[in-house]
Image (spheres, rainbow, N blue to C red):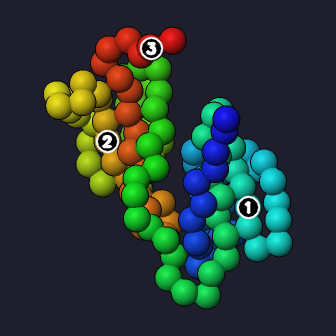
Amino acid sequence: MSGIVFFRSADRERVVEFYRTRLGFEPWVEQDGCTILAHDDLKLGFCDTDGDPETDGIVTLYYDSRDAVDEKRAALADVATDDPRENDQYDIYQFFGEDPEGRTLEFQTFLHDLPE
């Protein structure tokens, strides 16, 4: 089974461009008023709205190492909202940022081995 998380977007073109150029997502499906992007096993859909963009929740991207998180932080300094740090509660190394419409982005690596 696979899935897609959809968000209403008031500025879909700008948001899609951000996810493509800054986060490495690729177009997966283009529909009338909706763009679905894919990055590895994560698919996000952004659909036009005349109202407010949907910004609830957190889009979390995880990486293989602390170095990869640090590199992403350096590349996204203009949208990062904090510096990388260890989170003992979840045994992760993380930082947060925001996309152009204010959705919270989390960039993390697990500090322990993940199940296969």
Q: Most extreme residue toward the bottom, as rendered? A: 50
User: Does 115 sit above or below residue 96?
Assistant: above
Whether residue 90 sits left or right of residue 115 in the image: it is left
Mark 3 residue type: Pro
**Upstream in sequence: badge 2 or badge 1:** 1
Q: Which residue is mark 3?
A: 115
Residue 95 circle label? 2
Residue 104: image location, x then y, percent: 39, 57
Quarter of the figure with residue 35? bottom right
Whether residue 60 sits left or right of residue 92 in the image: it is right
Whether residue 49 sits left or right of residue 110 in the image: it is right
Mark 3 vs mark 2, CA separation in Å: 23 Å
Q: Which residue is mark 1?
A: 35
Image point (60%, 40%), residue name? 42
Mark 2 residue type: Phe
**Upstream in sequence: badge 3 or badge 2:** 2
Residue 61: image location, x then y, percent: 48, 39
Inspect this view and state whether residue 77 appears: no
Q: Most extreme residue toward the front, as rendered? A: 1
Residue 1: image location, x then y, percent: 67, 35
The front one of 58 and 95 is 58
User: Does 19 sit above or below residue 110?
Assistant: below
User: Does 77 sit above or below residue 92?
Assistant: below
Foreground label between 2 and 1: 1
Mark 2 vs mark 1, CA separation in Å: 27 Å
